[in-house]
Image (tube, rainbow, N blue to C red):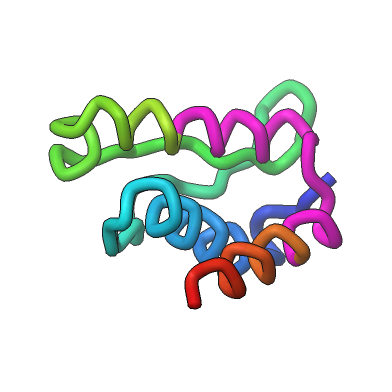
Amino acid sequence: MIDHNENKYLVYEYLVLSIRKNFNLEINLFNEYILAQNIVSKTRIIVPTFSDKITSNPRIKMFLTALILSLNSMNYNVTDLKKEVEYLKSSDS
């Protein structure tokens, strides 16, 4: 499981690169989500706090929501996420 707090820049890079690859857009995602701790499970999670910039584009909102859900549901570990970021970087060239 990813400790999102320790890997916040990796998570940010993954989200930004994913949008760039899938939508050919450069979007600043600072303040579009927060890192929090689940009250019950005590696990770290990413909580969307989407601004109008994101909510005004339903496709991007849905895409980011799916990515965040995937990260929160432990479908990725740090090694997987690093590999995905490297793949996104290399396919960007």
Residue shown at the point (42%, 36%) measured from the top left: 48
Judge by depth and name the residue closer to the eye, 37 or 59. Answer: 59
Residue shown at the point (14%, 32%) measured from the top left: 56
Q: Look at the image and say whether residue 81 sits in the magenta stretch.
A: yes
Count of all numbered marks drawn on residues in the image? 0
Residue 22, x across and y down, in percent: 42, 47
Residue 87, placed above or below residue 32? below
Residue 32, placed above or below residue 41? below
Q: Image quadrant of residue 5?
A: bottom right
The span picked out in magenta is 65-82
Residue 18, x across and y down, in percent: 49, 53
Looking at the image, which residue sits at the far bottom?
93
Judge by depth and name the residue closer to the eye, 73 or 5. Answer: 73
Looking at the image, which residue sits at the far top?
40
Residue 11, placed above or below residue 59? below
Judge by depth and name the residue closer to the eye, 22 or 17. Answer: 22
Residue 92, x across and y down, in percent: 49, 70
Left or right: 57 in relation to 28:
left
Judge by depth and name the residue closer to the eye, 70 or 83. Answer: 83
Q: Quadrant of the N terminus?
A: top right
Q: Image quadrant of residue 27?
A: bottom left
Residue shown at the point (34%, 61%) measured from the top left: 30
Left or right: 17 in relation to 86:
left
Residue 64, x across and y down, in percent: 43, 37
Residue 26, placed above or below residue 23? below
Q: Main secondary structure of the magenta part?
A: helix
Residue shown at the point (67%, 54%) measured from the top left: 4
Left or right: 25 in relation to 16:
left
